Amino acid sequence: MVRQSSLWKSIVFCLTILLFSITALSTPTHAAPEAKQRVFDDAGLLTKEEVTELEALSAKYSEKRETDFIILTSKDADGKDIEDFMGDTYDEKEFGYDKPKGNAVMLTMDMSERDVMVTGFGEGERLLDDNRADLVREKITPALSRGDYFDAFSQYIKSSYKYMGYREGVDPDNIFFSTLFQLAISVGLGVVVVGKMLYNSGGKVTVSGRTYSDANKSRVVQRRDVYVRTSVTKRRKPKNNSSGGSRGGGGGVTRGGSSYSGSRGKF
């Protein structure tokens, strides 16, 4: 009896192992999702290690802002103007963190013309408007001019992330003065409102200059116009220059119908 009991236990154990093995083999295995590409260095400006670091950096900040930070470099922009090249690429590849052609910020470079452009789509367009795109481009232009592309691209991602953290209408580089200006306006409006309330609470003034004047006896005796001088103010006409660190470009709509904010210039 003892041997039979041991035999049955062995059989049950083997059947259990066999059952688990069959279940494991029949269960479909899902491969790990492929890492999303956000760095497209077609101009060959970066090493493989630098591309890997920038991909990781972009993934980190893209997750926080729910906006993809894209880097796109080209040798000749496929013979197009950089703005058309940028827009066509966005539409064709359907960049976007949340959906195709969704939230994205793009840094596009054309090495043949030394053109650079920073653009925002979706939430990127709203929170990285033309002015903030100007600020990002101006920050990275010196590094681009020196050929420090990795540093420039890293700064682009971090600066774009930072500026998107401010509410609309605030100048990120002059946050103190913007806040002070808004505070001054608020205080000024408060003074005007309170002053008007105090004025109205004091009753209406019924006495005027006519109360004590006699229209029959008071007449204008003589009128005379005296010429004093003519004042002329000269103002220098601003030059239109979109190279280097100057501000230029602006938002628009791609040929595929995608609206964007932007800034373009030379480096």
Image (cartoon, rainbow, N blue to C red):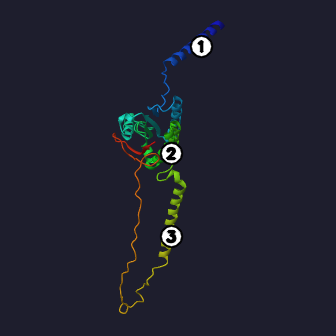
SS at badge 2: helix
Relative side of 39 to 91, left or right = right
The residue depicted at 48 percent of the width and 18 percent of the height is: 26
In front of the other: 206 or 47: 47
Which residue was labeled with disc 2?
139
Badge 1 or badge 2: first in the primary sequence? 1
- Looking at the rendered structure, the kind of residue marked 1 is Phe
Q: Position of residue 183 (x, y in %)?
A: 53, 61
Question: Where does residue 184 sit, x and y in percent of width and height?
Answer: 52, 63
Type of the residue with mark 2: Lys
Callout 3: helix, strand or loop? helix
Q: Which mark is residue 30?
A: none
Q: CA gap, disc 1 to disc 3?
A: 89 Å
How crowded pointer 2 is (Cα within 10 Å; few <14, some 14-19, many 20+) is rated as: some
Identity, as a three-letter code, of the amino acid under mark 3: Val
Name the image quarter holding the N terminus: top right
Where's residue 131, x and y in %?
A: 45, 50
Disc number at residue 194? 3
Q: Residue at x 54, y 30 (%)?
A: 49
On residue 13, the disc is 1
Q: Which residue occupies the foreground of this view, 151 or 244?
A: 244
Vertical order, 27 against 141 (above or below):
above
For the residue pair 152 and 114, the one nearer the viewer reads as: 114
Apparent side of residue 237 relative to residue 160 in the rendered image (left or right):
left
Secondary structure, mark 1, is helix
Give the alpha-carbon distance from disc 1 to disc 2, as whole Å. Answer: 69 Å
Q: Is residue 129 above or below residue 15?
A: below
Which residue is located at x 48 percent, y 72 percent? 196
Instruction: Tell me the distance, in whole angstroms, between the alpha carbons under discs 2 and 3.
Output: 44 Å
Label count reads 3
